[in-house]
């Protein structure tokens, strides 16, 4: 920024502080490119930079009546913008943290991803079960359906054996626990 | 230079923010009238009249400061001069009541307060680039502030104070014409 432009901004902001409404548009035209450029460079994102610069412009003009003419207007404007840049940076960081803390949608039962995953798991389970004997499949099915035969004292032992066979078959087929 | 549409929308918001900021600041300054009204209750006048006069003073302060310019710069000196005048008349009112002196002296005290207020306003106006406008705004605010104390002397007290301000301010400005100005 040239010293002449800086002096012009100073004069416009002093006029604003004095209540001169005719200085609003020229001050806006002088400050907007400066503050937008600063905010965009600071945030490295044109969208966020524009948001920060807009908020800064509104605050700056709202506080223009309090401006002390002995201060540097450009430094004052940049200070307000830097505060807005920091606010937006904090907001973006919190949004990222909230996204990381959010539950994984893929595990939710209503998404297409979850349907695909469940289908794959069912197909793999059927393949492993096909390698077991009919008696073992019937025992596991009865346990899953909560249809334990009454008076069958050996059911628990047979279920234990069937599950051990199932686990071993799963490990052998999928190389995982 | 014509701004593109998004910028024009922002310019409208900026304009509104500017006016809102000025209004809030003017209201904050006008709030100083509250303690003046409370102080005037300690005088010999009626609180209801003080409240009406305080409301008028607060309204004038708000409008003048919100508008801006030389008149807005006169608000603070006007209020200071008004507080001085108010304090003087309140003390005089109590003293005269204590010594049981009749109301004519109260009117005289109000006139003296008005003259002193006008002189103070004139000194402050010399430093303004628009001394006439400055003196009118500061004089009106100071007179309304001082009138809060002169209510004890009745309507005549308020008139006496106003006459004091109106008499001394133009004379002072004429006397100082051509003198040094800060801005």
Image (cartoon, coloured by chain):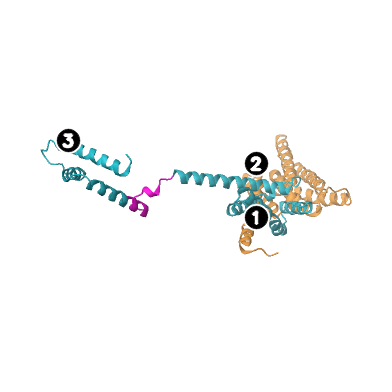
Chain colours: A cyan, B orange
Can you identify the residue that label 3 sits on? A157
Q: Marks 1/2: CA distance? A: 26 Å
Can you identify the residue that label 2 sits on? B35
Is disc 2 on the same chain as disc 1? yes
Q: Nearer the viewer, residue B62 or B174?
A: B62
Q: Marks 3/1: CA distance? A: 84 Å
Q: Chain of mark 1?
A: B
Mark nearer the viewer, 3 or 2? 3
Magenta stretch holds residue A80: no
Can you identify the residue that label 1 sits on? B19
Q: Residues within 10 Å of mark 3 (few under 14, many from 20)?
A: few
Q: Position of residue B28 (x, y in %)?
A: 64, 46
Mark nearer the viewer, 3 or 1? 3
Q: Secondary structure at mark 3?
A: helix
Q: Residue at x 28, y 51 (%)?
A: A123
Viewer can see residue B23:
no
Q: Nearer the viewer, residue B77 or A51?
A: A51
Q: Position of residue B7 (x, y in %)?
A: 63, 60
Q: Chain of mark 2?
A: B
Q: Residue at x 68, y 50 (%)?
A: A64
The residue stretch that appears in magenta: A102-117
User: Residue B104 appears in which quarter of the rendering?
Assistant: top right
Mark nearer the viewer, 1 or 2? 1
- Image quadrant in which the N terminus of chain B is located: bottom right
Q: Position of residue B11 (x, y in %)?
A: 64, 59
Q: Secondary structure at mark 2?
A: helix
Furthest residue in direction left, as rendered: A151
């Amino acid at each position: 920024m040239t010293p002449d432009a800086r002096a012009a901004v100073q004069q416009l902001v002093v006029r604003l502080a004095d209540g001169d409404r005719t200085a609003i548009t020229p001050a806006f035209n002088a400050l907007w490119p400066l503050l937008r450029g600063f905010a965009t460079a600071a945030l490295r994102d044109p969208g966020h930079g524009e948001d920060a610069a807009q908020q800064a412009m509104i605050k700056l003009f709202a506080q223009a009546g309090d401006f002390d003419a002995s201060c540097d207007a450009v430094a004052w404007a940049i200070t307000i913008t830097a505060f807005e840049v920091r606010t937006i940076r904090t907001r973006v960081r919190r949004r990222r943290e909230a996204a990381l803390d959010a539950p994984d949608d893929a595990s939710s039962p209503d998404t297409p991803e979850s349907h695909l995953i469940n289908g794959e798991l069912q197909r793999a389970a059927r393949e492993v079960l096909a390698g077991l004997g009919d008696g073992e499949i019937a025992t596991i099915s009865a346990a899953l359906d909560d249809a334990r035969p009454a008076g069958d004292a050996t059911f628990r032992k047979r279920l234990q054996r069937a599950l051990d066979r199932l686990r071993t078959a799963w490990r052998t087929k999928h190389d995982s626990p | 230079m014509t701004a593109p549409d998004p910028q024009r929308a922002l310019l409208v918001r900026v304009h509104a923010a500017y006016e809102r900021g000025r209004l809030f600041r003017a209201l904050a300054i006008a709030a100083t009238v509250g303690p003046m009204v409370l102080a005037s209750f300690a005088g010999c006048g009626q609180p209801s009249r003080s409240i009406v006069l305080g409301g008028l003073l607060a309204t004038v302060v708000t409008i003048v400061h919100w508008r801006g310019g030389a008149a807005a710069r006169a608000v603070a000196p006007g209020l200071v001069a008004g507080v001085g005048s108010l304090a003087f008349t309140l003390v005089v009112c109590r003293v005269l009541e204590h010594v049981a002196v009749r109301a004519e002296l109260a009117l005289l005290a109000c006139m003296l307060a008005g003259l002193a207020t006008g002189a103070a306003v004139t000194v402050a106006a010399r430093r303004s680039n628009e001394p006439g406008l400055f003196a009118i705004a500061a004089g009106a605010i100071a007179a309304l502030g001082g009138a809060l104390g002169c209510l004890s002397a009745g309507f005549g007290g308020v008139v006496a104070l106003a006459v004091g301000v109106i008499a001394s301010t133009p004379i002072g400005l004429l006397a100082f014409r051509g003198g040094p100005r800060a801005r």
